[in-house]
């Protein structure tokens, strides 16, 4: 192994330059700290590298993480052998999951932070309250919405929690399919609204929206209309002069000093040389699977089971928000046009909160979405070949609609990410192994919600509806959402991080991505991840870096909190 | 090792009239062309044959030169590094899958009807495809619910596909993918399915290609969302 000259130590090293890493870099650099950002993937240039090429972006691994380079193995049970499977293959590059995403940007709800206080210990699950409340996070949700760029319709969501600010831009216009969804919801008395989305629908801070191509969900956006840390927070952090962003640098270990505090990281650079980068603070922003994997690979005398893993929880309690849905096929004259739009339009929080009469806890944000481009548009049972396949394309491609939701799956201690004993990645390091078995509540919740999707499609006039439940018994990783593997909490015995996402066992280590989530929430996690990263980065810059400590008073949460908000 | 962000653009879009083979032998080319014509047959509309889908597959299997078109479609990205290694392995496996697949088509054809696959009638070829797919030819979409199915996987990657599944996936990609890859000749695929695709990849980058007219123009949010009348929300 070749070695490069050791670079000078810095204030902070941020590992992973996606949603949380980009946010942390912006906040810390703008506060004057000098930061090294390490991203194992490439640093692409939106206007030069992104366009409407379906085969390249959806069927090949230009953005998706390539399973031959970053393999993962998956199993349902701990005594099975995990099988190499593409699982949650979020793009590994500067901008991370915010490069290819459709950009669902809904806010979490107050109840998401108190699932255990509200529902007690659900058998077979490891429910936990968050050490913070919605009110602690709300100012940062607003900061992200306004600094990052968001579109939504004020006053449309009857179930909206408190907002200290309106939406920065209005929603994009609805598509014919969306109009059909709104009409069906009106007929059923369901409050529908445009799902808040990470895009600017009108000129905003130098960005002019011009991507009406429908090549949206799964593609990079060349126009800057869609919000991505690649185009917003990373350039803003660079503009301070305090960020040294090194792409194609793969961190394989967080090193530890004799006193057990973090020393820095060791990474393999683009030329295959090993480099040591020391820092006063180490921030992990790799995403829940990779942050846990890096901690488990960072074994030492002080941490034989992995960095800061005194509680043994690193990698456990993993949740993955399976995307489940129903497809409606229509045969009336008026085409719905399955392709235009920015993937999502109408949605509803009507069925988001728990209703014990349903026999399970939790609910879902439902969203109507378009069916995508010709190669990959699909519905289960679609004829695969022959004239029946060609007819299905001609008859239904422009007469179809999907209504789906990301499943608020429950954390379970045995659902975990650890290191595969056999399979290695392209750098010779152990691949992440995912063990996941759906909790009975997940299966019941998924069935109830998909049946509700079918009901709405029928009210919209669907000739045929096709439900997709959680059949396989485990998550497939089809949303790229990942959470819970490095839990926040107040008790170091069963959590890894405190309320500032600072490791209990290593006080100069923070984990700021979805790994910190005690529970998955029922909404797309990126806005919550970025708001939480901003909140913790503020604490780092204003308190920790100034040699002080501060604890959030813990006694002020509980069920009464929900009633009040 | 060049960073992925700096992979150069080389070659050119596949010529819509090109007939040369880069991977398949003549016999393989004719056999795969016949097979794709059963996956997406010709009827009152063009099918896989007219869209030159076999050429799309031939270019894809020729190595790693035709995996990624440049964003503006002016050529193809020359890969290097770990992703290039991954693709060399993937294409090598897929080449083997197709060579074995053609042999298998011919073996079953001779066993069942005597001549090679390419010499059979359409109906006979369908029977052979049913055999290797292990399932009857799909029936048209029927109204009666045929039960729920496992979720549709987002990543339709090539690794581990059987010959039949690869043939179906690549025929669909060749018929509906961007013409620079050698299929969808004259954009016939998009005409068949009713998708107003772009004139060029470049047009999808600079705002020239726009489906703005497919969005509603005259919508009134408070008409669509009764809640707005209560809260007096903005109706822009």
Image (tube, helix red, strand yellow):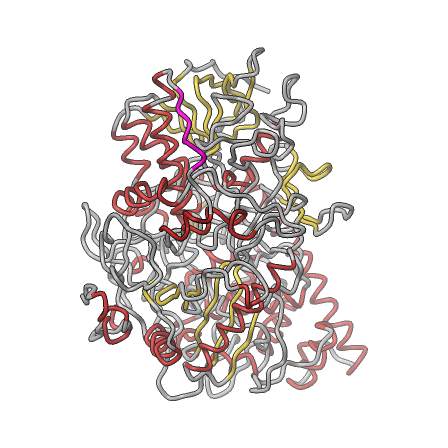
Q: Is residue A503 left or right of residue A107?
A: right
Nearer to us in this view, A305 or A141: A141
Judge whether residue A248 can be spotted in this image. Answer: no
Image location of residue A494, percent across then percent down: 60, 34
Above or below, A55 relative to B114: above
Which residue is located at x 63 percent, y 32 percent?
A429
**Magenta region, mostly helix, strand or loop?**
loop
Vertical order, A245 against A559 (above or below): above
**Residue B41 vertical placement versus A219 (above, below):** below
- For this orientation, the residue located farthest to the front is A560
Q: Residue furthest right?
A: B111
Report the span colored magenta. A549-555
**A551 inside magenta stretch:** yes
On the image, the x and y values in percent for residue B165 come to 64, 66
Q: Quadrant of residue B111?
A: bottom right
For the N terminus of chain A, give its image quadrant: top right
In percent of width and height, residue A385 lies at 59, 76
Q: Where residue A477 sits in the image (x, y, percent)?
A: 57, 53
Q: Which residue is situated farthest in the top direction here?
A: A258
**Residue A561 is covered by the magenta coloring:** no
Q: Quadrant of residue B145?
A: bottom right
User: Between residues A445 and A458, which one lies in front from this camera angle?
Assistant: A445
The residue under the point 38% across, 29% down is: A245
Q: Is residue B175 visible?
A: yes
Q: Residue at x 52, y 79 (%)?
A: A465
Q: Residue at x 56, y 61 (%)?
A: B58
- Figure disc tally: 0
- In the rendered view, does A366 fall on the left or right side of A519? left
Is A67 displayed left or right of B108 in the figure? left
């Amino acid at each position: 192994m070749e070695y490069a000259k050791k670079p000078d130590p810095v204030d902070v090293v941020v590992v992973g330059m996606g949603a949380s890493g980009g946010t942390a870099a912006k906040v810390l650099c703008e506060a004057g700290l000098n930061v090294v950002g390490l991203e194992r993937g490439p640093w692409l240039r939106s206007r030069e590298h992104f366009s409407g090429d379906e085969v390249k972006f959806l069927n090949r691994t230009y953005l998706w993480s390539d399973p031959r380079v970053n393999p993962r193995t998956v199993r349902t049970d701990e005594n099975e052998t995990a099988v190499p499977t593409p699982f949650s293959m979020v793009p590994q590059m500067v901008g991370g999951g915010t490069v290819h995403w459709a950009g669902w940007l809904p806010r979490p709800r107050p109840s998401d932070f108190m699932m255990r206080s509200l529902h007690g210990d659900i058998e077979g699950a490891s429910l936990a309250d968050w050490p913070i409340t919605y009110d602690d996070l709300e100012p940062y949700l607003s900061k992200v919405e306004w600094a990052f760029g968001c579109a939504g319709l004020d006053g449309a969501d009857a179930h909206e929690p408190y907002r200290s600010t309106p939406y920065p831009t209005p929603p994009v216009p609805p598509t014919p399919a969306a109009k059909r969804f709104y009409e069906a919801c009106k007929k059923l008395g369901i409050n529908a609204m445009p799902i808040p989305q990470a895009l600017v629908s009108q000129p905003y801070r130098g960005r002019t929206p011009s991507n009406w191509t429908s090549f949206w969900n799964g593609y990079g956006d060349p126009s800057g209309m869609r919000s991505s840390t690649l185009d917003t927070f990373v350039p803003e952090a660079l503009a301070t002069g305090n960020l040294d962003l090194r792409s194609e640098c793969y961190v394989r270990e967080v090193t530890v000093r004799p006193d057990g505090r973090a020393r820095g990281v060791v990474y393999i650079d683009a030329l295959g040389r090993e480099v040591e980068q020391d820092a006063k603070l180490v921030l992990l922003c790799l995403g829940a699977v990779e942050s846990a994997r890096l901690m488990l690979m960072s074994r030492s005398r002080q941490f034989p089971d992995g960095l800061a893993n005194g509680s043994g929880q690193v990698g456990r309690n993993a949740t993955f928000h399976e995307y489940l849905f129903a497809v409606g096929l229509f045969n009336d004259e008026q085409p719905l046009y399955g392709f235009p739009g920015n993937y999502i339009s109408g949605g509803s929080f009507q069925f988001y909160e728990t209703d014990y009469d349903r026999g399970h806890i939790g609910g879902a944000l439902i969203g109507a979405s378009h069916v995508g481009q010709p190669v990959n548009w699909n519905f289960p049972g679609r004829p695969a070949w022959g004239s029946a396949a060609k007819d299905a394309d001609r008859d239904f491609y422009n007469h179809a609609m999907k209504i789906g939701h990301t499943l608020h799956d429950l954390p379970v201690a045995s659902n975990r990410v650890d290191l595969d004993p056999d399979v290695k990645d392209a750098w010779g390091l152990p691949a992440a192994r995912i063990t996941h078995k759906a909790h009975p509540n997940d299966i019941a919740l998924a069935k109830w919600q998909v049946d509700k999707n079918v009901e709405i499609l029928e009210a919209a006039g669907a000739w045929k509806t096709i439900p997709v439940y959680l059949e396989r018994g485990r998550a497939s990783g089809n949303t790229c959402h990942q959470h819970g593997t490095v839990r926040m909490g107040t008790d170091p015995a069963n959590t890894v991080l405190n309320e500032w996402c600072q490791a209990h066992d290593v006080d100069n280590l923070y984990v700021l991505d979805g790994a910190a989530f005690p529970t998955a929430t029922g909404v797309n996690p990126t806005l919550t991840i970025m708001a939480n990263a901003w909140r913790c980065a503020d604490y780092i810059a204003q308190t920790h870096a100034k040699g002080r400590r501060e604890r959030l008073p813990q006694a002020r949460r509980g069920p009464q909190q929900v009633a009040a908000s | 090792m060049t960073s992925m962000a700096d992979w150069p653009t080389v070659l050119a879009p596949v010529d819509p009239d090109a007939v040369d083979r880069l991977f398949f032998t003549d016999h393989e080319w004719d056999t795969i062309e016949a097979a794709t014509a059963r996956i997406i047959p010709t009827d009152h509309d063009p099918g896989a044959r007219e869209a030159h889908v076999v050429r799309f597959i031939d270019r894809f299997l020729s190595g790693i030169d035709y995996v990624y078109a440049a964003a503006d479609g002016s050529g193809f990205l020359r890969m290097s590094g770990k992703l290039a290694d991954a693709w060399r392995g993937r294409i090598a496996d897929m080449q083997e899958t197709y060579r074995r697949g053609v042999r298998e088509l011919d073996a079953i054809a001779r066993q069942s009807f005597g001549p090679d696959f390419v010499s059979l009638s359409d109906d006979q070829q369908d029977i052979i495809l049913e055999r290797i797919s292990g399932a009857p030819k799909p029936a048209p979409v029927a109204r009666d619910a045929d039960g729920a199915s496992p979720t549709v996987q987002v990543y339709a990657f090539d690794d581990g596909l059987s010959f039949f599944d690869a043939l179906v996936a690549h025929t669909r990609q060749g018929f509906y993918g961007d013409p620079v890859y050698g299929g969808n000749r004259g954009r016939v695929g998009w005409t068949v399915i009713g998708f107003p695709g772009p004139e060029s990849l470049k047009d999808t980058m600079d705002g020239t290609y726009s489906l703005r007219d497919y969005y509603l123009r005259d919508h009134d949010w408070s008409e669509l969302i009764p809640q707005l009348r209560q809260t007096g929300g903005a109706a822009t």
